Image: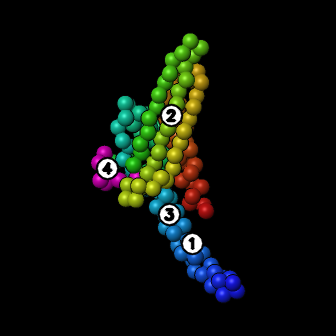
Amino acid sequence: MLTLAIGLGMLLPFAAIALGSQTAEAEQNTRIQAGSTVFIQPTDGLETLLKTAMLRSKVALVIVSDRREAAFEITGYATVLLGETGSEEHMNVAVKNTQTGELAFSYFQDIQNSKRGRQSGAESFAKQLKARMQHSTTN
């Protein structure tokens, strides 16, 4: 029994080193740095709203038209449900590393009775993405 405890005690530092290197690698794959290239997947016009919002918010990414040139890809959808009491909108957008497929950033919005619908969702996404990029460069 004592041998087992000593054996585990000797393995723990090595496990921590291995876990630390995996964490650093994952963080590098999910960090979106200024100047990175990004492809916005066409989806029912949402790509136009996202691109416009990112340009207006001055998100420091280079938008490319060919996915093969992109370090990151933006995918998502927006749905608007019209009911008797008003509209309900859901937007879900993800930014993934094109090399590893790892999720770098995600955004979800659920709005009741929105006047500008998908446009306001795209603008909010751009602001949140910009804030995330600025936060990750200071840490």
At x 29%, y 48%, the residue is: 66
Give the label on residue 20, or none.
Answer: 1
Q: Position of residue 123 (x, y in %)?
A: 52, 36
Give the label on residue 26, or none.
Answer: 3
Q: Which residue extends farthest right? A: 2
The mark lying in front, picked from 1 and 4, is 1
Give the label on residue 109, or none.
Answer: none
In whole angstroms, how far apart are the C-alphas of marks 3 and 4?
22 Å
Q: Which amino acid lies under the numbered mark 1 shown in the image of this protein?
A: Gly
Give the mark, 4 or 2, whose residue is nearer the N terminus: 4
The mark lying in front, picked from 3 and 4, is 3
Q: Which amino acid lies under the numbered mark 4 shown in the image of this protein?
A: Arg
In whole angstroms, how far apart are the C-alphas of marks 1 and 2?
34 Å
At x 50%, y 63%, the residue is: 26
* SS at circle 2: strand
Give the mark, 1 or 4, whose residue is nearer the N terminus: 1
Contact check, label 2 and label 3, Cβ < 8 Å = no
Give the mark, 1 or 2, whose residue is nearer the N terminus: 1
Q: Which residues are magenta?
A: 65-72
At x 31%, y 54%, the residue is: 69
Asked if residue 66 is among those painted magenta in the image, a careful observer would answer: yes
Q: Position of residue 20 (x, y in %)?
A: 57, 72
Contact check, label 1 and label 2, Cβ < 8 Å = no
Residue pointed to by mark 4: 67
The mark lying in front, picked from 4 and 2, is 2
In whole angstroms, how far apart are the C-alphas of marks 1 and 3?
10 Å
